[in-house]
Amino acid sequence: MPDSNSDSNSLPGLGRRAAVAALLRDRGNRLVVTGLGSPTYDVHALGDRDDNYYLWGAMGGAALVGLGLAQAQPDRRVLVVTGDGEQLMALGGLATIAVAGPRNLDIVVLDNQHYGETGMQASHTGRGIDLAAVAAACGFAATGTARTLQEVEALAATLREAAEGPRLFAIKIAADNPPRSLPSRDGVQIKNRFRTHLGFAAS
Amino acid sequence: MPNAEEGPDWPLDLHRVLKAAEVRQVAYVPDAGHSRLIELFDEDPEVVANVLTTEEEGVAIAAGAWLGGQRSVLLMQSSGVGNCINMLSLSAIGRFPLLMLVTMRGEWAEFNPWQVPMSRATQPALEAIGVRVLRAETPADLVEAVEAGAALAYEADQQIAVLIGQRLLGRKKW
């Protein structure tokens, strides 16, 4: 139901900030990569952290940054939080990730079925394209779609368990724009902070 | 020594140089010129090899690998450079080390005219997005260029493409 909460504005459905808060509530030591636009703001809104890498561009790259990171850090879990438009630009990347088969990589698509940064134009996911089904067809170890806060909480519990391969889940959220929560746009600083967190020298 | 069945030695030299540079991940879109090097990496238990559906995926993988403390190399043909351009924003703005080895088509004894336009655009497009280009026309040049490029990439945080001249690769047999 529409209400006055800025997280739901005038559109019905699950608020994105509430969904991301539930998703990352017991995040542990997972490394997080965020896709450009609102997913970057949503993760930052929970608090800036050294083990976040925020993308502000490179559309289509988030899940693949996650792949390279997961392969370099096989003992850590890696979570990519991105949007439907960003992931749609990299459908081929889902095939690459499935073939690579990392057991420590999860992708969560915040799916509002729209391009929120550019004026809320409808995306393919609102027109019949099912990203979880695409990932399943590629051979991801687990896939699914969450539509309520309760389902997101169950998803968060699933993501804390070990996996046999890469997993992808979509969370259907309201098409709204909560107030932006902006991390640093300095990609070098965020990179060096992230590497320092993992014990590597900043360069 | 070059061997008629095994082909030239430079892929073995590149594998040795990249191993000495501590490369742990390799990503590629298959290419005839890179086929032996790809085999060497696919058989190497110390290196994770990713086959890509399109070359820009490898630019993003390289950034992720570096975030996680590993060095990587990206193998492609000149046509693939065009696919990479926007993703190279990530390497440029994050100052992520990047080493691309690019086999050239469309410039020497080429039979396929469709390879020519991107061949002409390869070096200018790379330089326009901020990638430094090194070219090699002989096997000795190539090994030296990859050694130098690896140092520039992994030690000086630069984005490097080594273009491997089609003259070096030889006429495509088909």
Image (tube, coloured by chain):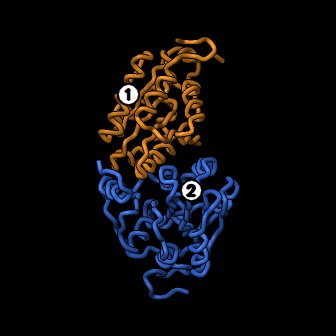
Task: Name the residue carrying label 1.
Answer: B147
Residue B167 appearing in the image = yes
Q: What hue does chain B carry in this figure? A: orange
Tell me the distance, in whole angstroms, between the alpha carbons under discs 1 and 2: 37 Å
Q: Is residue B68 above or below residue B110?
A: below
Q: Position of residue B66 (x, y in %)?
A: 41, 48
A93 is higher (above) or lower (below) than A32: above
Query: How would you rate the neighbour count of disc 1 (Cα within 10 Å): few for under 14, some for 14-19, many for 20 or more?
Result: some
The foreground one among B120 and A190 is A190
> Residue at the location (44% across, 34% down)?
B100
- Residue A179 image offset from top left, x and y in percent: 38, 75
Residue A163: x and y, percent?
62, 62
Q: Is residue B60 above or below residue B107?
A: below
- Res. B128 visible in picture: no
The C terminus of chain B lies in which quarter of the figure?
top right
Front tag of 1 and 2: 1
- Residue drawn at x 42%, y 65% is A40
- Give residue B112's quadrant in the image: top right
What amino acid type is highlighted by mark number 1? Glu
x and y percentages locating residue A180 in the rendered image? 37, 71
Chain depicted in blue: A
Q: Which mark is residue A88?
A: 2
Instruction: Identify the secondary structure beneath mark 1.
Output: helix
The three-letter code of the residue at mark 2 reads Leu
